[in-house]
Image (cartoon, coloured by chain):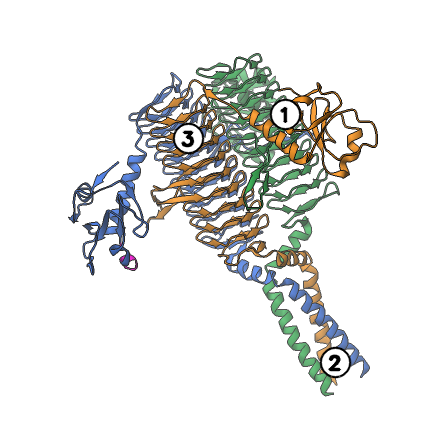
Chain colours: A orange, B blue, C green
Amino acid sequence: MQFSAHDIAMLLNGTVEGDASVTVNQLAKIEEAGEGCLSFLSNPKYEQYLYTTNASIVIVNNGQELTGPVKATLIRVENAYSAFTLVLQQYNSFRLNKKGIEEPNFIHPSAKVGADAYIGAFAYIGQDVKIGDNCKIYPNVNIGDNVTLGNNVTLFAGATVYFDCVIGNNVTIHSGAVIGSDGFGFAPNPDGSYSKIPQIGNVILEDDVEVGSNTTIDRATMGSTIIRKGTKIDNLIQIAHNVEIGSNTVIAAQSGISGSTKIGDRVVIGGQVGIAGHLHIANGTQFSAQTGINSSITEEGKVWGGTPYMPYKDYLRAHAKLRKLPELDRKVYELEKLIEELRKGQAAE
Amino acid sequence: MQFSAHDIAMLLNGTVEGDASVTVNQLAKIEEAGEGCLSFLSNPKYEQYLYTTNASIVIVNNGQELTGPVKATLIRVENAYSAFTLVLQQYNSFRLNKKGIEEPNFIHPSAKVGADAYIGAFAYIGQDVKIGDNCKIYPNVNIGDNVTLGNNVTLFAGATVYFDCVIGNNVTIHSGAVIGSDGFGFAPNPDGSYSKIPQIGNVILEDDVEVGSNTTIDRATMGSTIIRKGTKIDNLIQIAHNVEIGSNTVIAAQSGISGSTKIGDRVVIGGQVGIAGHLHIANGTQFSAQTGINSSITEEGKVWGGTPYMPYKDYLRAHAKLRKLPELDRKVYELEKLIEELRKGQAAE
Amino acid sequence: MQFSAHDIAMLLNGTVEGDASVTVNQLAKIEEAGEGCLSFLSNPKYEQYLYTTNASIVIVNNGQELTGPVKATLIRVENAYSAFTLVLQQYNSFRLNKKGIEEPNFIHPSAKVGADAYIGAFAYIGQDVKIGDNCKIYPNVNIGDNVTLGNNVTLFAGATVYFDCVIGNNVTIHSGAVIGSDGFGFAPNPDGSYSKIPQIGNVILEDDVEVGSNTTIDRATMGSTIIRKGTKIDNLIQIAHNVEIGSNTVIAAQSGISGSTKIGDRVVIGGQVGIAGHLHIANGTQFSAQTGINSSITEEGKVWGGTPYMPYKDYLRAHAKLRKLPELDRKVYELEKLIEELRKGQAAE
């Protein structure tokens, strides 16, 4: 894909300064850009790069003054940062704008696929599946029987959705993610073996949810595991059966949430956090990376850290002291000796 | 799938009270059930819901007395809880009772597939593979050359078994799990680079093992990585080369077991636990979530927590004090000052 | 595959002692070997097994003296350990020496595939993909548009490489690994919802990199996430957007590296380690398992442990004391009482 400065200025409602016919095919930061790159300057502290960059085109604010010669073609706009973000989005929608039905695929005769779909080769679409409009089903995706997908859903290559799950509008699921596998439920028998507890529920992902690659979200034992509108889930995360996660919550990579726990809205969960089962986590709670949570949190909007968790500031203070624990131990030992001496001294009087 | 009260009563050897022709197509908890749902009442503390539930059918104990009008059709049985579990299992076996060979698939001419198989589209079955009776190979599953599967094995969509691995009877492997990838073995060279140590062993999963989605179990360097009968492994777990895990052990999500470690029978491992390599863990050991284990455990049946691990009760006590460590530090500082004063006082006498 | 003692002696430039026609089809440790196995004796402490092993063939050093009767055929070589490693490598290259194009596959007409390729059934090779010579693309692999692969690259079943990524020579990617999924970048909106920041960069894996099963490496927001030459990455690891990892670094399973962090050369990272974003980690740094790193490390070659991290020796010492923290707490309490008594005593004088 090649775009000229003229094309980009049209898109951004900007004005060209320099050669309008120069073309770009890549986007890059101004300090790293080479020939053929489009870049931008918004933060004044990067202004020096404007005079040294190899970018072919740079988007700048209307008011940007020049204190030296600039090799690149400039496009002047109201807000260079927003304009560049718009270009990023346009670029991305081009890259991801796949259409059409590739062969071979497996689409069960009873399945319904909406308008403008992309169905990659080796995609599997089971019995009674309903897929909305403008969905992109990449190669080797597995959609089990009776799954429903809303509009504008993207399932990247190799993602799997088990039977009966419900996916809302504008949901993105990355490669290798597994939605709806069995919850980890086994009942112990007297002989030490385990019997499987059937997991007959499903998973519901509401609108605007994004699920990272190789994340696993288990189906409910009965009822639904639910991820509410706008929540964003990173890679390699475990969400167990019957968990409910509120709206606009974000969870960083490799965190795990145990069975039946309810997480509120606007919660922020760092990487490698572990949350035990059957808990309630209040709205707006924040967990720093590697926190371990073993009881419910009812106060909203607090920040926590450590395992087991404590207020984040206490965690920082306690762990700063932890490293000096051997010193403290030694001090106490010395105090014991001093006190023994003092006592002898007093007794001798 | 629709079932009438009459059908269900026949299955459960129960008696219908109310409209025997009413049908259900879902299972739900009595407090959450809507029309078309089958539910049950076993625990007396939920009895209130019997009179308010929207369930179409409720399974109750023979002796259940009614203190008000009930809208739902009742099915009376010896033990409502067991009867409902039976229905759950029946329901699940219906949902999972896929049969037949979907096209296109890849079955090597030398492979042998037993009776009553389900082979999903885009499933790959390599050279000399032997598959027992009543196996379900979902779409996009990969079975490498020379793999053996017992009877009643289910591999969900996108699961992968590398060449030479051996899977017992009644094993279930969920989507995205990888059985038999290379162990992480590299020998350092004098120039700082690494040479791969060939990993020529395999993985053996004995009967009744269940493996969760996106879990990885590496093949042995030589010999076998072994998971013994009845052990249940959750999602996103790492099991390294040459590990051996005993019988009826359960491992919760995101735990990792390093190379050559031997885990006993009936061990219970919480989520996000890490176990170092070349250790022995005694039968019946329990690890709370996020425990880190760096030495062998020879005493059976003990409970451990913390990183590095300690007896669980010590862990709880130590971490309760950890949060107050800054206070303790301050106390010691004040004691030092007090003692200094006392010593001056004594010296002055 | 069957090999005679004669064949193996030819390969190893060794001399046969015993029946040269005996054949083997497996490799095993001398203490575990059964009939049909090839084994070796190098370490004198295993010499006892030479007289009891059921191995059919044992490779021994030229100078190995016999103090009793040996049932197995011996092959005498200069260095038994090196010779056995050579056999391992040969065996492995036989097992992994797949060739040819299986059907059905999807190879975009614009894609270029080099000489001697293996393309498994249901492999997907997108538009403008360039694949070097002697590559092995196992079944159900997904290679997105515009991806470049060097020579001697192996992608095991179900691995996924997103569009625009660049894979060097001699790279191995195990099953379920995902290279190039979107970085986790979202900008908060005033209403609490999040807008996706387009992730338009790519991932570059340099020569000789190995990536374990179900590991995820996210594409850069702009520019590239880079793994440099010779670095080895285990299973279930998360590498976030814009991370750069140096040469000959090794990372054990389930570790996670957050966005934009730069890791040096020859770094050794244990299992379940977490590294925060935007940090620099010096060359030769070592992290023990489960370490949590929240600031940059500039000193080369140091060993660290704990969360937050500290020098490994401090970590061991501090955590040894941690378990005894309740005792220390009690001691301080008792000291406070003693001092109170002493002060009363002094005041009374």
Residue C293 placement (x, y as % from top left) = 65, 46
Where residue A169 sits, quadrant-wise, is top left
Is residue C293 found inside the magenta-colored segment of the image?
A: no
Asked if residue B217 is positioned above or below residue A349 in the image, the reply reads above
Would you name the residue on which mark 1 appears?
C79
In this rendering, the label closer to the viewer, 2 or 3: 3
Q: Residue at x 48, y 56 (%)?
A: A296
Q: Earlier in the sequence, mark 2 or mark 3?
A: 3
Disc 1 secondary structure class: loop
Amino acid, disc 3: Gly
- What secondary structure is found at the residue carrying circle 2? helix
Residue C270: image quadrant is top right
Magenta segment, which residues? B42-47
Q: Give the chain of mark 1.
A: C
Crowd around label 3: few <14 · some 14–19 · many ≥20 (10 Å): some
Q: Main secondary structure of the magenta part?
A: helix
Q: In the rendered view, does C16 fall on the left or right side of A60?
A: left
Three-letter code, disc 2: Gly
Tell me which chain the residue with mark 2 is part of.
A
